[in-house]
Image: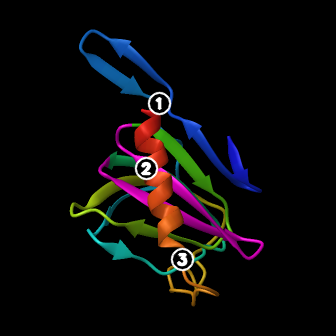
Amino acid sequence: MGLIKGVAVRPLESIQSGMAQFYTPQSSNETMLVQIAPETIDELFVHHFQTDQLLVVRGEFILVVLQNRKYEYIHLSESKPQVVEIPPGIPHGAINLNLEPCVLVNAVLRHGPTHEKDYRPLKRPFPYDLAAAKAKIEKSISAV
């Protein structure tokens, strides 16, 4: 499912074998384990030559994506295995309103060398709408 141009969220495919569930690995040039601290409202940042492929393995968080002067709030959780792909040039950040950290895997696709401004925080053009972020969490929980 595409949310905004370029950003895609898709369920993670899996197969059951006995007591184990095997999930499809993501192709990548580099794989990072990322921890988002509890009660975090992160700034935006952008990558110039990489695509992020995010999968939550423990906890949950809200991915914030900025495009066309509008924030999109995407709830990602360990209880619903899915991958979100963020191509280069799209500002994004994280909100973890929980008391527990969130752990995710980022299967990075490199399209060129790291840019000097990658991973540097960007000034938010306007504040996040935390009520909208919380509403996404509530909507996801009630859909399960």
Q: CA distance from mark 2 to mark 1?
A: 28 Å
Using residue 1 as the reference point, say whether residue 137 is left or right of it.
left
Residue tagged 3:
128
Q: How is the image coloured?
A: rainbow
Q: Is residue 129 magenta?
A: no
Instruction: Provide residue 44's location: percent of width, then percent of height.
Output: 54, 78
Task: For mark 3, give the secondary structure.
Answer: loop
Instruction: Return the mark for residue 109.
Output: none
Task: For mark 2, give the secondary structure.
Answer: helix
Task: For mark 1, give the secondary structure.
Answer: loop
Q: Nearer the viewer, residue 138 or 64?
A: 138
**Residue at 34% from the left image edge and 74% from the top image edge:** 40
Question: Which quadrant is the N terminus positioned in?
Answer: top right
Q: Nearer the viewer, residue 117 or 64?
A: 64
What residue range appears in magenta? 58-79
Circle nearer the N terminus (2, 1):
1
Residue tagged 1:
24
**Residue at 53% from the left image edge and 42% from the top image edge:** 27
Using residue 118 as the reference point, say whether residue 97 is left or right of it.
left
Q: CA distance from mark 1 to mark 3?
A: 33 Å
Q: Amino acid at mark 2?
A: Glu
Circle nearer the N terminus (2, 3):
3
Residue tagged 2:
138
Q: CA distance from mark 2 to mark 3?
A: 17 Å
Residue 81 visible in the picture: no
Main SS type for the magenta part?
strand
Q: Amino acid at mark 1?
A: Thr
Placement of 130 over or under 75, stated as above or below? below
Using residue 61 as the reference point, say whether residue 135 is left or right of it.
right
Circle 2 or circle 3, nearest the eye: 2
**Residue at 67% from the left image edge and 60% from the top image edge:** 87
